[in-house]
Image (cartoon, rainbow, N blue to C red):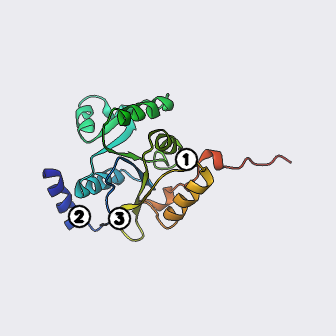
Amino acid sequence: MLRRLIARLFWAFSPWKLRSEPAPTQPTILLGAPHTSNWDFVFMLAIAWRLGIDIRWLGKKSLFAGWRGPIMRALGGIPVDRSDPSRVVGEVVARVRSGEVFGLVVTPDGTRGGNTHWKSGFSRIAQETGMPVTLGYVDRTTRTVGLGPTFAITGDVPTDMDRIRAFYADKSGYHPERRVEPRLASELAPIPVE
């Protein structure tokens, strides 16, 4: 109740607008892209609280150190040891199989710039759990944030990523210059040697 009230106040006074398709009614992976600013975290909470979505999100282990740990966990955080990314997928799969119901927020383009491609963990988690993917976004050009369509990942990487690219084609992120094109490493063609 308090979270919904905070979210309503946020959206009432924010210069940004929430535009959303209906919130998912089943466990889903919520893609948060383009991830270009720390404001994305605030938007994520405001969207989830306004739409009544119980979320979990993955964050680097250092965010959970000391006094921040209990706060981050209360906000849905799951600490990630980046030295072992396969363990992260296994942990999320175990949570879903144990019956925990949540929307898992994933920022596949990584840490706000410096990357050339998206990480594929969201696709692996979707395939292993059967969770669909909901496309969440931030777009500075229209000052809108929200949730787009929800669909199942097929495992056909080019087809799945073409659908994702089409949705994000006109979404700029908070800092457009930091946007990473939705493309997995497996899609990047090697440069031919002459």
The residue lying toward the viewer, choosing from 105 and 67, is 105
Residue at image position (29%, 52%) is: 42
**Which residue bears the numbered disc 2?**
11
> In the image, is residue 28 above or below residue 15?
above
Q: Residues within 10 Å of mark 3 (few under 14, many from 20)?
A: few
Above/below status of 63 relative to 155: above
Quarter assignment of residue 136: bottom left
Distance between mark 3 and mark 1 Cα atoms = 29 Å
- Are the residues tagged 2 and 3 within 8 Å (C-beta)? no
Residue 168 is situated, as x and y percent measured from the top left of the image, at 49, 62
**Mark positioned earlier in the residue sequence (3 or 1):** 3
Q: Is disc 1 surrounded by few (<14), some (14 to 19) or many (20+) residues within 10 Å?
A: some
Q: Amino acid at mark 2?
A: Trp
> At 17% from the left edge and 51% from the top edge, which residue is drawn?
3
Q: Please indicate whether residue 87 sits to the left or right of residue 46 in the image.
A: right
The residue drawn where x is 36% and y is 68% is 143
Look at mark 1 in the image and give the residue it sits on.
Answer: 115
Residue 86, placed above or below residue 76? above
Residue 55: image x %, image y %?
Answer: 30, 46
